[in-house]
Image (spheres, rainbow, N blue to C red):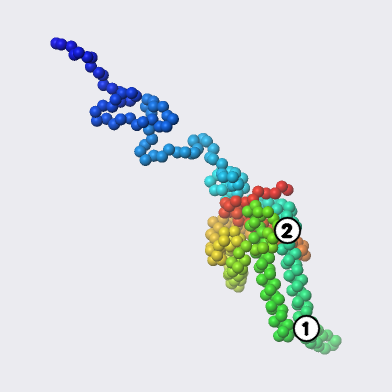
């Protein structure tokens, strides 16, 4: 038997680089850019995109963009560890509010002073109406007992009603200004006199306040308890109108949904807010100059906390 002139060529290993593919076999994929071909290396699957900038297992996530609070800090955006948005810390919220007031007292007492000026104007107009339009009648009970009764005429009643209406609008304006100032502080904006004297979205705020007042008044007329319930569920309505630029109806819906989902924290927020204002009332109402802005700062802090929204860093004590 004759030998072949050339030795037979062994079959090529498909995994061995440098060998030509066999008939009917797909050629191996080319190496990726910057990658050296090697034995047993698997190319990316069809339709799979390479992952750029993804953290590997056990690696920390990338930091948030500049200007955004860092992970674990107050106001960190949702997704990072230690993100607020579930619990209200009364001590933290009150400390934040009081230190913000203490470090910006000159601007934050202006709304309280404006309330006192409005009140003084109302009293002065009331005395003027009595002096100009009032009539005094003496009612004698006999045996030397009598009393004098003063009544306003039509002109005095109209004047007093108009001044009272202006006073109510002024109070709404100042309340909206205080809450707007608290929102600006939570945003980290510089605090100026204008911050607490210029309301944000005053028209919708008035609409929200009127609707909340009507609903609460109807609730109080129905044996008081429904009014307390309405006041609780609608406690964040005005803040939501300002902070989220919502319509009055949507702001009340937002407040209802938040308090319904965070009942315990919302009750704590309401009680502490009213306690701060009550302390101001007990100090001959003069304390409201301090209590009113501190209470609204506390309320806005809790509102942002429960929503997981950013909050400006606390000032040093």
CA gap between label 1 and label 2 equals 38 Å
Q: Which residue is mark 2?
A: 107
Q: Position of residue 238 (x, y in %)?
A: 60, 63
285 with respect to 260 (left or right): right
Is the N terminus in the top left, top right, bottom left or bottom right quadrant?
top left
| Vertical position of residue 241 compared to residue 136: above or below | above
| Vertical position of residue 134 compared to residue 115: above or below | below
Label 2: how many residues lie within 10 Å, few (<14), some (14-19) or many (20+)?
some
Residue 142 visible? The answer is yes
In front: 126, or 220? 126
Circle 2 sits in a helix, a strand or a loop, which is it? Answer: helix
| Vertical position of residue 31 compared to residue 168: above or below | above
| Vertical position of residue 162 compared to residue 233: above or below | below
Residue 274 visible? The answer is no
In front: 232, or 107? 107
Residue at the spot x=60%, y=56% of the render? Answer: 303
Identify the image quadrant of residue 164: bottom right
Q: Position of residue 283 (x, y in %)?
A: 77, 62
Q: Which residue is mark 1?
A: 132
136 with respect to 206 (left or right): right
Q: Which mark is drawn over residue 24? A: none
Circle 1 sits in a helix, a strand or a loop, which is it? Answer: helix
Residue at the spot x=66%, y=67% of the render? Answer: 173
**Foreground tag (1 vs 2):** 2
């Amino acid at each position: 038997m004759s030998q072949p002139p050339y030795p037979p060529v062994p079959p090529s290993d498909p995994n061995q680089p440098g060998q030509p593919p066999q008939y009917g076999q797909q050629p191996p994929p080319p190496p990726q850019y910057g990658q050296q071909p090697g034995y047993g290396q698997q190319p990316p699957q069809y339709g799979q995109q390479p992952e750029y900038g993804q953290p590997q297992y056990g690696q920390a996530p990338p930091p948030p963009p500049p200007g955004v609070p860092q992970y674990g800090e107050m106001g960190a955006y949702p997704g990072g560890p230690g993100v607020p948005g579930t619990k209200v810390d009364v001590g933290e919220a009150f400390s934040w509010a009081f230190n913000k007031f203490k470090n910006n007292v000159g601007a934050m007492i202006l709304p309280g002073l404006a309330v006192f000026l409005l009140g003084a104007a109302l009293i002065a107009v009331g005395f003027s109406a009595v002096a100009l339009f009032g009539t005094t009648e003496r009612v004698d009970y006999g045996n030397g007992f009598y009393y004098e009764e003063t009544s306003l005429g039509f002109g005095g009643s109209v004047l007093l009603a108009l001044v009272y209406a202006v006073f109510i609008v002024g109070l709404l304006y100042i309340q909206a200004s205080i809450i707007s100032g608290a929102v600006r502080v939570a945003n980290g904006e510089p605090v100026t006199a204008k911050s607490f004297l210029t309301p944000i979205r005053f028209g919708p705020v008035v609409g929200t306040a009127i609707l909340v007042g009507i609903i609460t008044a109807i609730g109080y007329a129905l044996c008081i308890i429904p009014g307390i319930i309405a006041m609780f569920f609608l406690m964040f309505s005005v803040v939501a109108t300002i902070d989220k630029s919502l319509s009055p109806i949507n702001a009340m819906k937002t407040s209802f949904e938040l308090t319904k989902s965070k009942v315990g924290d919302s009750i704590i927020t309401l009680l502490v807010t009213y306690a701060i204002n009550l302390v101001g009332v007990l100090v001959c109402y003069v304390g409201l100059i301090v209590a009113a802005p501190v209470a609204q700062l506390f309320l806005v802090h809790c509102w942002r906390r429960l929503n997981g929204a950013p909050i400006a860093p606390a000032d040093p004590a």
